[in-house]
Image: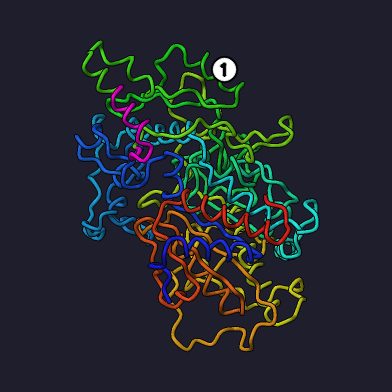
């Protein structure tokens, strides 16, 4: 039975009961989850006058080939650009369904300063997105789910003790990673990750790039399949920095050839943090960013905000000061903002976001001992608006997966943590179903064929001392096929003690289908191994299941995430009180 059309209240009640009984919780989110924070979604982000007048769309702006600074235009081969089109299977479709993505052709490559492929527009777009992300706080739903995650991780007898399932998952992941603590966290990672802590009975998987999850969740339990805008890389592929692993740290001559200046200390670093006090200066009328900051108060303001650990106020917020005294234009501007305040559900756009002020900015990214924090921030002079690579002085770019993006440098350590957790849950599931509790023994070869569809950058995982099964075979890089009727599960007998897993998916549509595929694939894998998984999909436009084979383990709720989370939480708390347990 497909629960998509079940009465809303009944769906809420059932989802709360599944949450209450679940031993493991996986949260999977897409752009719709951030919409409740007041951020723009895929459909609305670039829907503003500055872009509409030029005929520019989000998919045009969200491409790495925009970058050009006028000094190395020959560095990018135009023919090569067009030959790379369509290489990623997760290329978004038109949200309204009216345009066939296969018919989409990228804009031609231009070198002229007034064309969109000039860096001023690249940094205008991404810089304003980052300013927006840093301004708005994560919505209440993050905290609700964090409480649920702590509930699954904690023993029912004592808050200070881990649950049995959480402890067993951590033990398995530790064995999968061996003795190399680098896989848990190291100075080469662009933010703090504890070298000793591992995810237990909760994990968070997202395609969002706003980095809001670090305000609430722990860094070792987060997987961002498209990266995030707080982490940056060099735009020069030769330097930045997929190829850096092939150069020895002692090979100063090789470093020198790529502009490293013989500085081998940071050569191994692939990714960098954007400093918290760096605020992009944007011309709101044209959505362009000059290479240097023109505002004389920038240095003073950013120093003050650095002390407060909060980003500086966006220049676009001060656009009213640049309206040349036009009373009608000022009134129109104010009216628009009053309308937005009175209608919190009004779509947000780049430079015009809603929501509360962000006050716990990236707290789990920060080192607990600031004096010991590695030097992983990009060095950016106060007057510079465009970040540059500290090794070769090329322009920097956010380390996020864009369209037609072959140069993205993904966080391999974060990916490995997710892979080990995923496999640990499957191993625990199989051992529980068979009644064999020796899942902590050596990792059997069955799990080398697991495909979790986290399909970017696999070819770059090359550390020999890491667990080799983190890298799937070539055949596994394709999206999973639905389970065929009559497929024999790995567990042939009735499970004795099935592992109960709830996958809570929020705001994941078809524009970027990776997250929906992750959710449904895990349901398949757990079912095959005798587990008891369920998927609750919350999406106002596409709450249906994509795979008919999982419908018996599926609930679709056609509403926005935050409203549903609050209602599930209310029922969930009553269930805890009813059995005499504390309410988190």
Residue sitting at 35 percent across and 47 percent down?
A: 42
Is 143 in front, or is 423? 143
Q: Name the residue furthest front.
A: 578
Q: Residue 343: give x, y in percent of width and height.
A: 35, 36
Drawn side of residue 263 relative to residue 93, left or right: right
Q: Residue 552: give x, y in percent of width and height.
A: 48, 76
User: Splitting the image into 4 quarters, where does residue 151 fall?
Assistant: bottom right
Drawn side of residue 265 relative to residue 458, left or right: right
Residue sitting at 27 percent across and 17 percent down?
A: 330
Q: Does the stretch in magenta take in 303?
A: no
Residue sitting at 23 percent across and 54 percent down?
A: 104
Task: Tell me: residue 547, above or below residue 131.
Answer: below
* Residue linked to disc 1: 304
Q: Residue 250: give x, y in percent of width and height.
A: 67, 43
Is 469 in front, or is 194? 194
The magenta segment: 334-348
Q: Main secondary structure of the magenta part?
A: helix
Q: Residues within 10 Å of mark 1 (few under 14, many from 20)?
A: some
Task: Tell me: residue 551, above or below residue 37.
Answer: below
């Amino acid at each position: 039975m497909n629960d998509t059309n079940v009465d809303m209240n009944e769906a809420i009640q059932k989802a709360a009961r599944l949450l209450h009984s679940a031993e493991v919780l996986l949260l999977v989110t897409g752009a719709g989850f951030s919409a409740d924070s007041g951020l723009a979604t895929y459909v609305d982000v670039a829907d503003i006058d500055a872009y509409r007048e030029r005929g520019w769309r989000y998919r045009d702006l969200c491409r790495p080939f925009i970058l050009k600074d006028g000094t190395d235009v020959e560095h990018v081969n135009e023919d090569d650009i067009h030959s790379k089109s369509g290489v990623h299977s997760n290329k978004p479709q038109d949200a309204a369904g009216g345009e066939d993505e296969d018919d989409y052709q990228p804009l031609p490559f231009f070198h002229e300063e007034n064309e969109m492929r000039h860096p001023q527009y690249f940094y205008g777009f991404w810089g304003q997105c980052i300013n927006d992300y840093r301004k708005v706080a994560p919505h209440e739903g993050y905290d609700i789910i964090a409480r649920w995650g702590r509930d699954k991780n904690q023993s029912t007898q004592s808050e200070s003790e881990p649950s049995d399932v959480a402890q067993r998952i951590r033990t398995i992941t530790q064995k999968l990673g061996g003795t190399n603590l680098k896989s848990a966290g190291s100075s080469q990672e662009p933010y703090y990750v504890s070298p000793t802590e591992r995810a237990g009975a909760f994990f968070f998987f997202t395609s969002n790039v706003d980095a809001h999850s670090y305000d609430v969740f722990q860094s070792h339990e987060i997987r961002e399949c498209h990266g995030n805008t707080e982490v940056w890389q060099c735009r020069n592929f030769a330097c930045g920095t997929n190829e850096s692993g092939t150069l020895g740290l002692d090979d100063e001559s090789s470093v020198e050839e790529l502009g490293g200046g013989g500085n081998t200390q940071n050569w191994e670093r692939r990714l960098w943090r954007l400093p918290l006090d760096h605020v992009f200066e944007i011309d709101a009328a044209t959505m362009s960013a000059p290479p240097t900051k023109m505002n004389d108060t920038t240095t003073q303001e950013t120093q003050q905000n650095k002390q407060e650990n909060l980003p500086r106020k966006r220049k676009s917020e001060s656009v009213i000061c640049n309206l040349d005294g036009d009373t009608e234009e000022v009134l129109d501007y104010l009216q628009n903002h009053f309308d937005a305040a009175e209608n919190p559900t009004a779509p947000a756009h780049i430079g015009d976001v809603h929501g509360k002020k962000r006050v716990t900015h990236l707290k789990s990214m920060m080192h607990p001992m600031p004096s010991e924090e590695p030097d992983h921030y990009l060095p950016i002079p106060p007057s510079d608006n465009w970040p540059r690579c500290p090794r070769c002085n090329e322009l920097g770019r956010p380390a996020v997966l864009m369209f037609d993006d072959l140069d993205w440098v993904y966080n391999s350590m974060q990916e490995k943590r997710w892979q080990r957790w995923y496999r640990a849950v499957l191993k625990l599931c199989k051992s529980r179903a068979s009644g064999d509790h020796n899942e902590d023994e050596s990792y059997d070869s069955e799990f080398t064929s697991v495909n979790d569809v986290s399909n970017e950058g696999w070819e770059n995982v090359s550390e020999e001392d890491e667990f080799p099964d983190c890298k799937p075979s070539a055949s596994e890089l394709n999206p999973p096929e639905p389970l065929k009727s009559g497929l024999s599960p790995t567990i042939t007998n009735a499970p004795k003690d099935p592992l109960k897993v709830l996958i809570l998916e929020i705001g994941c549509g078809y524009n970027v289908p990776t997250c929906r595929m992750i959710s449904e694939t895990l349901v398949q894998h757990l079912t095959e191994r005798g587990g008891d998984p369920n998927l609750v999909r919350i999406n106002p436009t596409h709450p249906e299941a994509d795979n008919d084979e999982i419908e018996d383990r599926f609930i679709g709720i056609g509403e926005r995430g935050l409203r549903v989370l609050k209602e599930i939480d209310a029922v969930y708390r009553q269930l805890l009180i009813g059995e005499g347990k504390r309410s988190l």
